[in-house]
Amino acid sequence: MKKSEKIFFSIIIPTYDMAEYLSYSVKSVLCQNYKNFEIIVVDNHSKDNTKKVIKDFKNKKIRFFQIYNYGVIGKSRNLGIKKSRGNWIAFLDADDKWFKNRLSYIKKKIEKNNFDFIGDSSVIKNSSKKIEKKIWHFGFKKNNSYENFLRYGSVFSTSQSVVRKKFIFKNKIFFSDKKIFSSFEDFDFFLNMSFKGAKFLFLRKVLGEQLIHDNSTTAKKKNYYQSFEAVIRHHVNKQKFQKDKKKLLKEILLFHKVKDMIRGLSNNNNTITNILMIFFCFLSSPIYFIKIIYKLIDRQINYIERLK
């Protein structure tokens, strides 16, 4: 990259005691075919050797900051956003990694299209199940609207997301620092982008790998559902497409309740209980229940692929 050339991508990596994975994450960025980027690592004062891991890279593209985020990862991402010098901001979790052609592929899409958000697909690996691998495709096939995201999301992957910096600064969109949002602050962030009229592009191109393990945020269930419901309630009150907010909230929560129970059945968890709960959900709203099943089947077919 020439000295006079403005940085194109700012990659923000929040981390806390993830040195074991962080080196692979950073390495996957440094190995990118496209080189016009900076890496911003925001460390929540880790107690492991995170600082040494970053120092050992001896790379000027890496900028290291520390913050006390008190369990709110959004604070770390916000610091990264404010320190960024690039035109586009890409998020990457410390335990995820990208394929070497990701930034070059995304850059070409940016040049050909006018979008404020670009998301791609990823391979999902579960460290506790060595054989299981999935490909997750994000977004919706036809309608990437705020209403669709709110009703049937979250359909975003932070590590596979790139956003236009100018758009989020113009609309003053940052990650929430509310602790109750802490498991879904990224969903709230992307919902806010959609609410402000952002243009979304989701690619079915697999350009990264996400790891689910015992220490990952995805695996932590504490306050998980409370956090999700808090974000949903906030946006139900904020939205303008339906006047009956109580009805909308009931429909959204029912959709996700049925989705979780069906997932429990597929994982052979509490089979009889889940069947009974699904039956009662059907009785509570038969017509909407059929719509839920249709939506779930559509998402399963189009957005999740199992690798052989």
Image (spheres, rainbow, N blue to C red):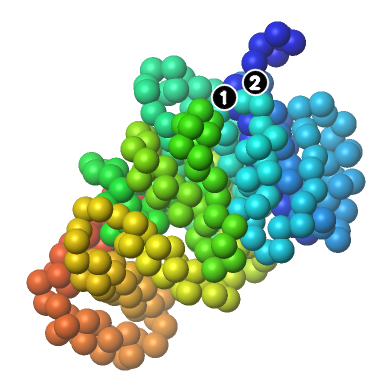
Q: Residue furthest left?
A: 287
Cβ–Cβ under 8 Å for marks 2 and 1: yes
Residue type (three-letter) at the residue carrying disc 1: Asn
**Dot 1 corresponds to which residue?**
87
Residue 239 at x, y percent in the picture = 30, 55
Identify the image quadrant of residue 177. Answer: bottom right
Q: Determine the residue positioned at 50% across, 22% down.
A: 107
Q: Earlier in the sequence, mark 2 or mark 1?
A: 2
Give the label on residue 7, or none: 2
Quick one: 296 or 11, which is closer to the camera? Answer: 11
Mark 2: few, some, or many residues within 10 Å (few <14, many ≥20)? some
Q: Nearer the viewer, residue 106 or 124?
A: 106
Task: Give the residue at x 80% y 48%.
Answer: 66
Q: Secondary structure beneath disc 2?
A: loop
Mark 2–mark 1 distance (CA, rounded to whole Å): 7 Å
Q: Secondary structure at mark 1?
A: loop
Instruction: State the mark number for residue 255.
Output: none
Percent across and percent down for residue 50 are: 83, 51
Instruction: Quadrant for the N terminus, please.
Output: top right
39 displayed left or right of 158: right
Amino acid type at circle 2 is: Ile
Q: Quadrant of residue 32?
A: top right
Circle 1 crowding by C-alpha within 10 Å: few under 14, some 14–19, many from 20: some
193 on left or right of 289: right
